[in-house]
Image: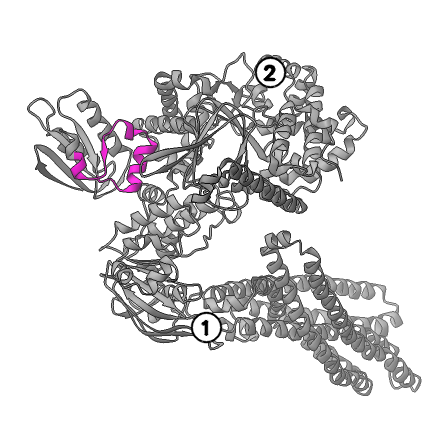
Amino acid sequence: MSSSTEKNVETDKSKGFQQDLEYLRQNPLFANLEFEFLKLLVMLSKKIELIEGDQLLVQDEDDGFSYYLISGKLTAYHSRNDRVYTLRSYEPGQFFGGMGLFGASSRLYTVEAVETSNVLRLHRDGFQKAVQRFPETMAHIVANMTAELLHWEKNRLSMIDDHHLEEGIQPLGISLL
Amino acid sequence: MNISRSEEQGVVILSPDGRLDSNSAPSLEQEIGTISYGNDGHHLLLDFSKVEYISSAGLRVVLKTVKERQSASKSFAVSNMQEHVREVFEISGFDSYVSIHPDKVQALNSFT
Amino acid sequence: MGLKRDLPVHQRSLYSWIFTGKWYLQVLLVLVILALVALNVLPLEIQKRIVNEVLALGNVQQLVVYCLIYLLAVLLSNLCKLTVNGLQTLIGQRALTDMRKELYQHILRLPLSFFRKTPPGTVVASLVTELAASANFVGGAVAVPLSNILMLLAIGGFLIWLHPLLGVVTLSIYPIALLVVPLVQRGVNTANKKRVDASNRMASRITETISGISEVHAQGSFQTEEQSYNTIVEKLFRIRVVWSLYRFGVKVTNNLFVGLGPVVVLLLGGYLLMQGETELGSIVAFLSAQEKLYTPWKELIAFYQTQQDASVRYHKIMQIFDGRPEFMLIGDQPATAPVRGKIEIKDVEFVTTNGIRLLDQVNLNLDGGEHLALVGFSGSGKSTLAKCIGQLYVHTDGKLLLDGSSVSEMSKEEIVRSVGFISQEPFIFSGTINDNLLYACNAIDEFPERDIPKISPSLDDKIAVLQQTGIFVDTLRFGLNSILDAKTHADLEKRFLKVRQNFQQNFGAEFGEHVEFYREDAYLYYSTIMENLVFGSLHGDYHLTDLKKNKDFISFLDTGNLKAPLLETGAELLLQTIDILGRDVPRETVFFEQTPILPDTYDDYLDLADRLQGASPLDLPKKLQLRLLKPAFNYIPARHKIIDLQPQLENLILNGRRAFREWSQDNSAFDVTFYSDTEYLRSQSILNNIFYGNLTSDSPKVEDRVNQCIVLLLIEEDLLERVAAIGMEFDVGNRGDKLSGGQQQKLSIARVLLKKPKVLIMDEATSALDNASQARIQSLVENWKGSTTVISVIHRLDLLPSFDKVAVMKSGKIIEFGEPETLIANQGVLYELIHGKKR
């Protein structure tokens, strides 16, 4: 078994491949996973270039991808009754949409490109096939996911002052991890 | 294919019934040709509630009508499209040239 | 053979097949056999005469004559034997073919409940393997016993005529054998029955496991499955050994008895000879006749075994398929299309053979054109009810009427003409989209000639249903991405060139940065190396793939210093792929999208990689070099991220392009048309022809915009429907695996809509689709209120308002029925289902 820090000389043959590997490694969902598994994920991932206005995820639709923003800028928002409520923006190096990898589900938010951007995306079908190949990784991924959720929640809690806490805790955006 | 004709608020409403394909498109074209779009003409509304299917022949008639009335004083709209017919307009980009409305009331209002 | 038979196939005896088919073949067979028998007896007489008369008298001429006759007899007899075998095979295979056809016909129409009990493996094994034994039997059923018994009688008769005492004694062995052999045969039969059972079980096990292979992989239950399989295989091994031993036992028993024959002749005959009561010639004839007796006797025993074997297998098969269809295929009168689509369900019950009551006193009335939603928990019977209305199940009690006629008594033809049934599981057959689309309509058109015109949907009809179900855009895409068949669509080339011009004029500026044009002086990152080199299309029946194997082309590469770098590239691609994917990666397309190596050849390439260890690609034999070149030829830098394209290689290829142009002009073997913006590119897809290049952007917005422009241009040139028709020729792959799950489901729905049924039954038909598609189909169906009766089993209760009536089911009963708004207002069971239990 190889450790996650192992680098194979052969993979230097493709700069693109190496780069994508580095991006995937940075995803907290994939922390401490087997190198062989990550290489497979890279083979299943695709780089897409978007122009302003391109929508990656659409509210109420099931795209089935997870994304990593390589360059550019994205915004996430929720629509209700013809009004749009901005949730947050994404900067290069950030991940989102990971929940789409685990099972079919409709998104609660739309994520759209604000300027020309590049993302690396991985589809659920490919991901699940890769997990079938390396079944032990699923346990790790779930643990990573749980840690992320916890971390997120912790942050949220710390941002609410005592006064507002009394009125009720309202966590938001957790499904975009 | 039957095309029923009526008038409301000065707008001529044509309601084709059935399929707008290469057989029936010419008769629609003819019917539309009888409605002038000059100053003494009429606005035109196509009520698509009974249109089950539109082929490229039908779409060309719509396109021609759009072009004719683009800079004319009398305009043109389509209403009550069935979902899959609406989609054909979307995939061909027609929905950006043609004024499309969900129902007759909104369509008639759009002419004022 | 017609559809009407006196007896259903599973009740026919094995022997009834002997005389079906061409009876004159059997007559011919008998005649040839008679000749054969005569020709076999003749040499015996000649032998006797030679020994007794000719040898004694020293008449050489006579000797030669007799020997010639003997030779002639042998030749003719062998010729007859050949003819007999030929006729036997013909008769046997004809019977087998007929059996297979009729049994299959019978099986297909058996009730669905049969298929729940009987594994497909058994059906396959029965039709493919087990019936074959019956063929052997039927083929020889007349020939073998007749010829051999005649032979025995003739030779036996001859022997007795030669010397009655000796003859009778010699022949007496056989009746004894006749008593003993069947005893051993009984053991064979018992073992054979067990063997058939075990074989069927093995076939079923395999089919079951392989159909559920995803679950096996998901649970990692390989060892459990292997153990279970191994147990069956071991059992089959033991049974087969026992069976074979018994069969040999029969042969050995037979041989033992027969072996006694010569002993008797020598003993008794020798004694009689010494006593002067017979001649040497007769003894010789006797010994010779013994030999001749052996063969027919052996064949009779073998035939007996064949008959027993065939009988056991045949009866086992017919036992398995003992059942009757629940419906008639065709009615006596021509089917009249239902006028209203009115459904009446009175006290309908469905009790299974195990006594489970799936439908309990169901009462329901629907007027023609009304839309009914069937809801309830799992196991409430809603799907069963839907299937009963569609004649897929037959209810056990009560009345189910469609426009006054009882559904269970209607012929299949009547039902399918008026009722459309869409199930939850799409079943897409291998073939094109068009084949699948026409499946339901073709089934109806296959019924015998009536005065009702055939359905034969037009292209517009098909496009309409594709639009309605939401796969029109997909079909257009398939069409645009296909390569035009020059033979059938040559007239379109000019028209697509016009589209290309229009595209350039109207949209060239807008999309310029998103298209990689086919420029002679530029490397095309979105095309393969081969396409870059050739930069043209081949004419006639040649394709680029043929070039890859062509010797002249390879030597061109060699002289152009291209072969070595291409081999290196191929090696690099191969080793990288193996390094990243590993040797055990599942051979599925999704893993191989970024490498030019294809999943189904991966094993060959693994072997090739082993050969490359420590060797240079140039050292490989020619055949392997060709194999290594293939991924290099197919390498697309923009898509295959697994390696980077080296600048040196890029330049080499560009130079190679120029060199190729010169070379092909001198080389008359290849008629190449080079890419030019005024020529249609035969080796590229329609879309690439319109662009005169490759689309480079993945941006969804750009793609949508491009699609819009292309569709607009196609509409203007009246090519939209033609491209859709081309798209319908797309081959969907094995069980439709080239289509996504959603596409498969939509295609299943489209095929039923195409036949415009008066009554439409949807058994959770859209539940596998995404929300938008479900809504689209729901609103489509809503448009048919008043014209089509719809019964829909639904899960999503938010769709209820669009139905006229709702029936809530629980444990096989309808517990609430009425208009959705009324039932919700009453806050009964439906309300609870929607909003959850009251607190």
Q: For the point 41% across and 42% down, which residue is it?
A: A60
Q: Is A5 positioned to the left or the right of C483 in the image?
A: right
Q: Is residue C661 above or below residue C824?
A: above
The residue sitting at the right extreme is: C274
Report the label total. Answer: 2
Residue type (three-letter) at the residue carrying disc 1: Arg
Label 2 crowd bin: few (<14), some (14–19), many (20+), radius 10 Å: many
Q: Nearer the viewer, residue C146 or C407?
A: C407
State the image coordinates of residue A131 (x, y, percent, origin top left): 63, 44
Residue type (three-letter) at the residue carrying disc 2: Phe
Which residue is tagged 2?
Answer: C660
Residue C571 in sight: yes
Q: For the point 45% across and 39% down, which residue is it?
A: A163
Q: CA distance from mark 1 to mark 2?
A: 69 Å
Q: Is A125 positioned to the left or the right of C677 in the image?
A: right
Label 1 crowd bin: few (<14), some (14–19), many (20+), radius 10 Å: some
Q: Which sits earlier in the primary sequence, circle 1 or circle 2?
A: 1
State the image coordinates of residue C410 (x, y, percent, origin top left): 33, 68
Tag 2, which secondary structure?
A: helix
Q: Is residue B99 a member of the stretch shown in magenta?
A: yes
Which residue is tagged 1?
Answer: C324
State the image coordinates of residue A70 (x, y, percent, origin top left): 55, 25
The quadrant in which the N terminus of chain B is found is: top left
